[in-house]
Amino acid sequence: DQQVKQNSPSLSVQEGRISILNCDYTNSMFDYFLWYKKYPAEGPTFLISISSIKDKNEDGRFTVFLNKSAKHLSLHIVPSQPGDSAVYFCAASAGGSNYKLTFGKGTLLTVNP
Amino acid sequence: NAGVTQTPKFRVLKTGQSMTLLCAQDMNHEYMYWYRQDPGMGLRLIHYSVGEGTTAKGEVPDGYNVSRLKKQNFLLGLESAAPSQTSVYFCASSDPGINQPQHFGDGTRLSIL
């Protein structure tokens, strides 16, 4: 039973446009959410996070939105750049801890020049 | 600044052989983790450690053992390798606390024939 779902395996956008990556979760105990970015042959790198007490967190071109009632979060990248092309993983944890993360399957983002 | 270093990067084993994967971090992090990633899947937690001398089971611990004799090192052992353990293995480390993201190594690609 997958508790963190990224239903879009891939997404393609034009350079300069907005990229929106979506993530749904089923476990109501999750209270901390993260996005990781992964290039081929490298480990995931932390991108941005959000606590369940917030509904938005922004860091430069990256913004994460959290809708607790819908158990849904999204990552917005504006403007998208070719270097953003990577696999993006959504992850969640429960109980105020940062360990025992549950990851989604990832979404491959391709930004076309 | 090495961060999290995994050794080896690639390995091919025969069924029944044993091996140890080494993870070393130079960030003085308390927590360390081992994940596996299979095609089309997110990362799944194998074992983790919240401090030197401690270990705990994650989501998929069967067939693996771990040890954390030194704070900076976390070893993952396969006593009798099976083809189902063919995967990419990632090590990560973090500080305690809700806002402390996990930092990942670049992975070990393990094939078991």
Image (cartoon, coloured by chain):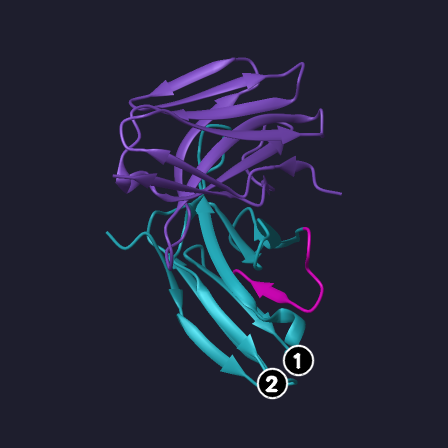
Disc 2 and disc 1 in contact, CB within 8 angstroms? yes
Question: In the rendered view, would you say B89 is above or below B31?
Answer: below
Rendered shade, chain A? purple
Q: Residue at x 45, y 66 (%)?
A: B108
> Residue B14: which disc?
none
Q: Chain of mark 1?
A: B
The stretch in magenta equals B59-69
Which residue is more in the foreground, B43 or A83?
A83
Residue density around tag 1, few if under 14, some if 14–19, many if 20 or more, within 10 Å: some
Of marks 2 and 1, which one's residue comes earlier in the chain?
A: 2
Residue at numbered disc 2: B17
Out of A83 and B111, give the one closest to the viewer. A83
Which residue in the structure is indicated by mark 1?
Answer: B80
The kind of secondary structure element at disc 2 is loop
Q: Is residue B111 left or right of residue A2?
A: left
Q: Which quadrant of the figure has residue B37?
A: bottom right
Give me the residue at 61% from left, 51% from top: B44
Q: In the image, what residue occupies the spot 56% across and 40% down?
A: A99
Q: Residue at x 42, y 17 (%)?
A: A57
Mark 1 secondary-structure assignment: loop
Which amino acid lies under the numbered mark 1 shown in the image of this protein?
Ser
Quadrant of the image for the C terminus of chain B? bottom right
- Residue B23 rendering spot, x and y as whole percentages: 43, 62
Please give the letter of the chain rendered in cyan.
Answer: B
Q: Is residue A91 above or below residue B103?
A: above
Residue A107 in the image, given as x and y percentages of width and height: 50, 41
The three-letter code of the residue at mark 2 reads Gln
State the predominant SS element of the stretch in magenta.
loop
The chain ID associated with circle 2 is B
Answer whether residue B14 is magenta in the image: no
